[in-house]
Amino acid sequence: MTNTIKPRDAKELRQAVEWALGEGVTLDVRGEGSKLALGQPMQCAQVLDLSGLSGIVDYAPEELVVTLRAGTAMREVEALLAQRNQMLAFEPPDLGPLLGRAPGQGTLVGAVMGNLAGSRRLSAGAARDHLLGFSGVNGRGEAFKSGGRVMKNVTGYDLSKVLAGSWGTLAVLDEVSVKVLPAPDQTATLMLLGLDDAAAVRAMCAAMGSPHEVSGAAHLPGRTALRLEGVAPSVEARLKGLRDLMADAGAKMEELGTLESRTFWREVRDVAPLNATPEEIVWKISCPPTEGPAILARIKTQRPAARAFYDWSGGLIWLALPPTADADHAIVRGALGATGGHATLIRAPEAMRAAVPVFQPQSPALAALAARVKESFDPKGLFNPDRMG
Amino acid sequence: MEMPPLDPAILARRSEIVAALRAIVPGEGVIDDLDGMRPFECDALSAYRQMPLVVVLPETVAQVAAILRYCQDNKVKVVPRGGGTSLSGGSMPVGDAILLAMGKFNRVLEIDYANRCARVQPGVTNLGVTKAVEHEGFYYAPDPSSQIACSIGGNVAENSGGVHCLKYGLTTNNLLGIEMVLMNGEVVRLGGKHLDSGGYDLLGLMTGSEGLLGVVTEVTVRLLRKPSTARAVLLGFPTEAGAADCVAAVIASGIIPGGMEMMDKEATKCAEAYVGAGYPLDAEGLLIVELDGPPVEVDYLVERVAEIAKGRGATTIRVSHDEQERVLFWAGRKAAFPAVGQISPDYMCLDGSVPRGKLVEVLAEMRRLSKQYGLRVVNVFHAGDGNLHPLILFDANDPDELRRCEELGADILRLCVRVGGVLTGEHGVGIEKRDLMGVQFTEIDLDQQMRVKCAFDPDHLLNPGKVFPKLRRCAELGRLVVTQNNIPFPDIPRF
């Protein structure tokens, strides 16, 4: 039976860490726990529940910034921003259903800790690009801060970047300031039908390199989708331009309007095409866009039953494999070859995630550096031990 | 500006160190004569000068690694330098440190249009990247005003911005990967042509680390397709508050302009006298708003911006009708610093960032401070992202003016922090703002940053005397005394 400790304010948060430090107790740090099934499994004596630190501290739409407590639910933030026609431009996915949970769970800070991003990663960046600053507690039980609430800030090291994507292993956050952007008036999707992977990635890369400001480029079996967002006259003009450009691909084309587009891109964002088969292993592969098809082809020669779709113009492969004892990690990572990309095991039974490196193994020099960085924040390894392997 | 005391033992070993460097970098890559080192004695913060111990210009990654390893083994300090355009003294030499000048790393290694990226050596200039790809309609987005001379490696170190940051981001948002050498000589690659990292985002940490963590030897930047059109709107307001309100209203209406710059009356007057851009001289606040994208979108947004400006009491609304006019609107803004240089023997350029909503309050307070110190302040700033560039006019030959200028500058930066802003938006801390770090950060904040530094450079050999007001030894920072608890938190809810 794990114990849970649930601080109600910044002071209690710091005291909780101090206490854990004194007791030599490791902490399983969580918000709503929506991503517990992601990462290397942990054995912690204590849960540090951040859901008591919840709420919007300040929202200034004309400043494009929202400040909130670490336990604030994503749905709360998104609803607030929607009232002012703004959004989190990095399009954080809801991985709940993919991971076998209900949709609509999770905190904004949880998304930041996983550095998650949806299809707009290509044009707007990931969570890392939107975290302006934070305050929190390090593994020494010290309250500290970095960054701020302004758009442009180079004062001191940009610790926000290294916190984003750290899966809670460096520090426990108390408050964050996040950049927000205006939500687009209109969304349209140009759908190319019947392209194979290689032709689809060529088309997506051509679209991304065009002046038509494509904000999403995904390829599902038989369907290649290009998203345009913005004010109505602009979307209309770019859609026409994109159609002309894509004529070369020789594919049949369809268009989706705003509502249909939103549904389609939400499904891509949330990896919905792989939700229905919970027994399959799911990998997320980040690679140079043009390498995507070759990487997938190498995997398919060894695992013909593999299913996949592409986002990020081919640079993100969502891969589903039939279950095997070792998640086929050697095959998946072997297929990356010298492309320099990385593969993360997203969905797999706990025992498998304990046995297989969930995150891409690093070169010895880089791994040693990362370990020293971890130690600089959390010398006793209190926070989410082993979560990143 | 106080720098760490020179180490006499290192100074005494100078000839031995020079010989060791010559063994690594043959020929003319090691400069140890005074005349040869003179061009390196300062960066763009030219009020401060210092001769380095010796200058070394490596040409290969292996040489950089060998130099750093030698320096680590022999506890010799190293100051890395790119284009030498830092406005905060980021590449100012240190008397007992070698100056590692990366100017020979000046090749574009690969351009990959399909993956929209370019792999370049760090000594390539910022504009050099755009020049290499513009014939295909691409460009590299961050555009610091020094872009003709500043290097990409320096941009990584400083997380450089420019006038288009609000829409296109800073350097950190436009990098895909780097190769770097650590102080121990290890070569590490972060990122590549793909997005994001499998582990900690050390690429993001390196960006803006001011040359204190590692030496960048290769950079992969993201390329963007050039917008098909750009038009600028020139807006004059009878009050600064009107201009500031307009900035907020444009953003609140859902428009993110490619650039949104503001100048006060004095700056407008200087710029107009210098380039004759046709600026309205009666305006207390002048805005240049640039909209870019497809022509139909730009036309649509230009109209909306003009409408918003009218509603906020703009007395001048002029829209550029062709590229020549757009460039002319910008010419005054781009020449604002040299234009101010015409009316004063010297000026100091500050770089605080504030929440946009505080612009008017900050301007008023700055004016009060300006009177108090008896020095004129001219204001030019990136209004869209709240990044101020107040220019303090002074005469460096008058020691009292220099002192007052430094004090006024510090007071203005304290003001920025007080209203919720920061010391530096894009120029970096360097030596210039080093001693003000305590205004924005607590000692614990700074200790945490220094511990990160220790993870990369345990002996504080890389770019010493910069960023941190006082350095603490890594061994001391790493110490952690844990005391056993006797009460396990009765007050915190537990389950």
Image (cartoon, coloured by chain):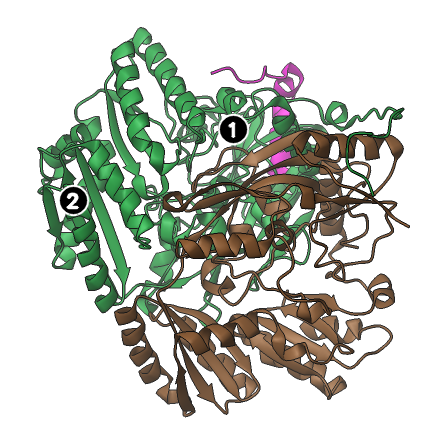
Chain colours: A brown, B green
Q: Is residue A55 above or below residue B196?
A: above
Q: What chain letter is assigned to the residue under label 1?
A: B
Circle 2: is it few (<14), some (14-19), or many (20+) Cα within 10 Å?
many
- What is the number of the mark on residue B235? 2
Tags 2 and 1 on a common chain = yes
Q: Quadrant of residue A126?
A: bottom right
* Residue type beneath disc 2: Leu
Q: Earlier in the sequence, mark 2 or mark 1?
A: 1
Q: Quadrant of residue A11?
A: top right
The stretch of residues the image draws in magenta is: B1-23
Image location (x, y in percent) of residue A292: 59, 76
Single out the residue that lies furthest toward the top. B400
| Magenta highlight: main SS | helix
Depth check, front residue: B79 or A59? A59
Q: Is residue A325 left or right of residue A13?
A: right
Q: Which residue is mark 1?
A: B32
- Is B4 within the magenta? yes
Residue at 16 percent of width and 58 percent of height: B323
Task: Compare residues B369 and B343 and report the one nearer the observer.
Answer: B369
Q: How many marks?
A: 2
